[in-house]
Structure formats: structure tokens, C-alpha cells
Image (spheres, rainbow, N blue to C red):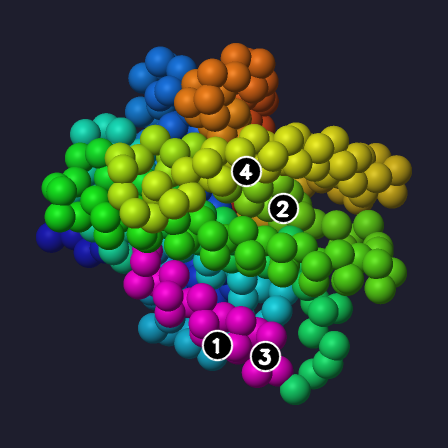
Amino acid sequence: MTTARPVPDSLRSRLAESVQTLTPGYFALPMAAGIISVGLELEGFHAFSAALLVICAASYAVILILSLARLARFRPDMRRDFMDPARAFGFFTFIAGTNVLGVRLGMAGWPGTTATLLAVAVLAWVVLGYVVPWTAVLGRDERPVVKDANGTWFIWCVASQSVSVAAASIEPVAGPDWRAALALVAVVAWSVGLILYAAVGIFVSLRLMTYPIRPEDLRPQYFVAMGAMAISVLAGARIVEMAGAPMVDATRGLVAGSSVVFWSFASWLFPVLLAAGWWRHVIHRVPLSYEPGLWSVIFPLGMYAVAGIYLGRASDLPIVAAIGQAELWLAVAAFLATFAGMLWHLWITLARPTPR
């Protein structure tokens, strides 16, 4: 009879520390894998898309388990995250990650799973949509809170738009009794997401114009500003394609025209954010190494590609579709590089033996 070898204390402590310090925004990993999988599926690269779907589902499950373990064992740390304006809005990646996974599974022929995940996401959207702004912003005694506004705040908008995309994506296969409700959810979530984008844009702009900007402050999460605009485009395109319903019929023209405007603004933001990265890493030589926030760059890249492909096909805009198709491969390359960096990071922090 053999006995199991005890886990070395050093490895056990590293695992515990990793769970304790898990960033709330790590669901951006399945968001990135899922949306690139959607783009590859739209372009007909089914095997490559399936591989990304596996990564999306597996990473979602692992991060969910680690988050629940953190809630059970390190509740004070999670509570501090809810009170921190710089980290709290990362919790909204759970909503977006749930919906991205659901939409991709719906494309694979599992609309029931999409509906289930959408129900979970809507519940989380309603709860976190009130809890996070209160704990991280309105409930704080410290003022001004705007000094802590950053790119992660845009994830609030992304979460809202992901609800809209998921609701619109399952509407074609839903029963007649559910279509009006799904149309209501899709249009309301899309509208709320746009208002939130405007509000967050004001807060983040005030922070950038009021306080000094150090190279270390322009973290990768600022790319979410472009991703939030791109997912608004995708949500709008999906709403336009929905069957007739009171909410859709009342807003179809507005949504269709707005989607083109939003794609244009997302395109304008692209070189601005690239220039900010150049200023940070090339001009001021901030080292470019793996950090969880990099997934907040990969998701916007993938979302911009998918939004362009979908909008171009839905609105007969071939140049928009061509831009999305070309940019999809930039997103794929960035994903592979970041994924390799993450695996190396996990190896050196968890698996590599500690020197004696």
C-alpha cells in the first residue's frame, strides 16, 4: 500500500496566495477566448474555433472554482476588492464571461445552455449593478473618488451589452411566448450600457485631465473603452436582426444607425490606445510582462473584429467586414502570445520547484 506524498508547504502556500490575491477581473480570459472563438467560427475556421471554445469553457470553470474558494476562505480580501474603486468593477467580467461562453455554446447548438447562462448573468447584472457602484464609489467616505477611476469601470458597460447580445442571440430559437421578453431585455440592456458608457467616459476623462498621468497608470484595462464600444456595435446589430416585437420595432432604426456610429468611434479609439501603449512601454520603458490585465486588451481586440464582421454582413458594409476579418488575426496572435505568457507565469510562480 502506498501513501500519497504530501504537498510541499511551499507549493501549498503559493497556491493559497494565488487564490487570496486572485484579481476580480480574471474572467476576461474566458471573455477573450470566447469572443475570438466566435470570430473564427463566423469565418469558417471550425477546428481552431473549437479549440478556443475549450479554452474558454475550461478557464471559465477554473476561475469560477477559484473565485468561490476565495469567497469561502479569504472573504475579507474579496470584501476589500468590493470597496476598492480600482478593482471592484472587475467583478463585472463574471457577467460578460458568462454571456460570451453562452453565446458561443449557442452557436455550437446548445441554446438551452445559453438561456441558462443568460439567466445567471441577468441575476448577477442586477445585483452587481447596484452593489459594486455603492460599495466602491457612493458608499466610500474618501473623496474625490474620481481619482481612482480607470479603464476597468468600462467593464460595467461591457457586462450590460453582453446581456443584450446573449438575449438577442437566442431570440430566433425561443418560443413565441419568450420573444417579446427577450426583446425587452436586449433593448433595455443595450440602452443601459450606452448610458453607463457615457457616464464612465466622463469619470475617466476627469481623472485623466485632473490628476497627473504616470506611465504606470495607463494600464492595459484602458483598452476596455474600445471593447465596450465594439460590443455595443455587436449588440445593436443583433437587435436589428431580431423578429418584430414592440421594443425592437420602436428602436430598430435608431439602433441600426447608432451601430455604425459606434463602430466609427471604436475605430477612432484604436490608434489612440495603441499610441498610449507606445508612450508607456517604448517612450517610458515600462516593462511589458504578463499580468492578468492583459486579457482586458485581448478581449477588445477580438470584440472589435467580431463587431466589424457581423456589422459588415448585417448591414451590407463589405469594407467594415474586411477590416474585422483582418483584425481578427491580430487578435488571434495577441491571444496566443498572452496565453503563452500566462502559462510561463503560472509555471514560475506555482510549478517550478523552489531552490533549496
Secondary structure type for disc 1: helix
The residue mark sitting in front, 4 or 3, is 4
Precedes in sequence: disc 2 or disc 3: 3
Q: Name the residue under label 4.
A: 258
Residue at point 55%, 58% (across, down): 196
Within the image, what quadrant is residue 100 found in? top left
Callout 1 amino acid: Arg
Badge 3 local density, few (<14 within 10 Å), some, or many (20+)?
Answer: few
Callout 4 amino acid: Ser
Callout 3 amino acid: Leu
Calculate the distance from the C-alpha at mark 3 to the C-alpha at mark 1.
16 Å
Q: Specify start and end residues of the magenta stretch as a single range.
A: 121-140
Within the image, what quadrant is residue 203 found in? bottom right
The residue mark sitting in front, 4 or 2, is 4
Secondary structure type for disc 4: helix
Q: Mark 2 points at which residue?
A: 225
Residue at point 57%, 41% (across, down): 229
Q: In this view, does 9 lie above or below 119?
A: below
